[in-house]
Image (cartoon, rainbow, N blue to C red):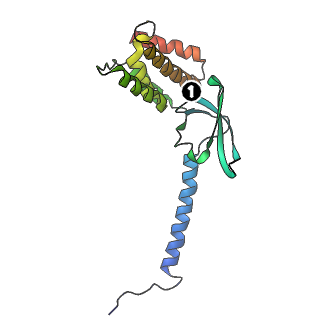
């Protein structure tokens, strides 16, 4: 005895399928908007290169394929980059941080440095990864831990270079957020680090 019955055609199953399809389409449209907040003229941060500006968003033909790309210029290092818009977030592209994140980062910089007894080579790699993450809080950790180099010649050349790279990334992003000159932001950041 078979108790399984097929649902009637055009009944609940078709209506449910149409509703599910409409819901999925609506979610897809919302998802695209949430993941694609970039507009031409925006200042953005690309994890590997720092602060840049969105020059254009449009369709380009690359290797015979039409791709929607976002073109970013980095005036500090005279570079232009094009990234497929669908992969922008995965590539580490994000908007400038909020004031709350800057405040959190500043409180980290004011904290007590974490001194590790590990080999410098391993610590240097960890610091470089934090800088390249593009995360302002992680960059603040590098500044906190290496800040003794603010006005001294202590430490190695590579330590000094890492400190300067972290400082440059931090200052560039905060300057855009606060609409200030980088030199002014650097001056106030240096004062905070000296006082800590």
Vertical placement of 85 versus 123: above or below? below
Residue placed most toward the observer, 23 or 55: 55
Coordinates of residue 17 in the picture (x, y in percent): 51, 72
Coordinates of residue 196 in the picture (x, y in percent): 38, 12
Residue placed most toward the observer, 91 or 178: 91
Which residue matches tag 1?
A: 177
Q: Is residue 144 left or right of residue 34?
A: left
Vertical placement of 82 versus 17: above or below? above
How packed mark 1 is, by other alpha carbons closer than 10 Å (few <14, some 14-19, many 20 or more), is: some
Q: Secondary structure at mark 1?
A: helix
Q: Residue at x 40, y 11 (%)?
A: 155
Vertical placement of 30 versus 52: above or below? below
Q: Residue at x 50, y 13 (%)?
A: 188
Q: Residue at x 56, y 62 (%)?
A: 25
Pick the quarter of the image with the N terminus.
bottom left
Corner quadrant of residue 178? top right
Corner quadrant of residue 49? top right
Asked whether the viewer can see residue 137, the reply is no
């Amino acid at each position: 005895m078979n108790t399984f019955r097929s649902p009637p055609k055009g009944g609940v199953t078709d209506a449910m399928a149409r509703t599910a399809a409409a819901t999925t389409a609506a979610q897809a449209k919302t998802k695209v908007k949430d993941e694609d907040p970039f507009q031409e003229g925006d200042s953005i941060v690309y994890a590997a290169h720092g602060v840049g500006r969105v020059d254009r968003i449009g369709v380009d033909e690359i290797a015979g394929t039409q791709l929607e790309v976002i073109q970013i210029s980095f005036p500090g290092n005279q570079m232009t980059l094009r990234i497929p818009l669908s992969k922008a977030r995965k590539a580490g592209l994000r908007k400038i941080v909020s004031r709350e994140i800057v405040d959190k980062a500043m409180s980290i910089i004011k904290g007590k440095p974490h001194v590790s007894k590990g080999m410098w080579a391993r610590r240097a790699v960890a610091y470089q990864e934090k800088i390249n993450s593009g995360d302002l809080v992680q960059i603040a950790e590098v500044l906190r831990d290496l800040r003794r180099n603010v006005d001294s010649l202590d430490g190695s050349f590579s330590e000094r270079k890492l400190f300067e790279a972290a400082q440059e990334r931090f200052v560039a992003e905060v300057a855009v957020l606060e609409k200030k000159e980088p030199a002014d932001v650097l001056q106030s950041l240096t004062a905070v680090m000296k006082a800590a």
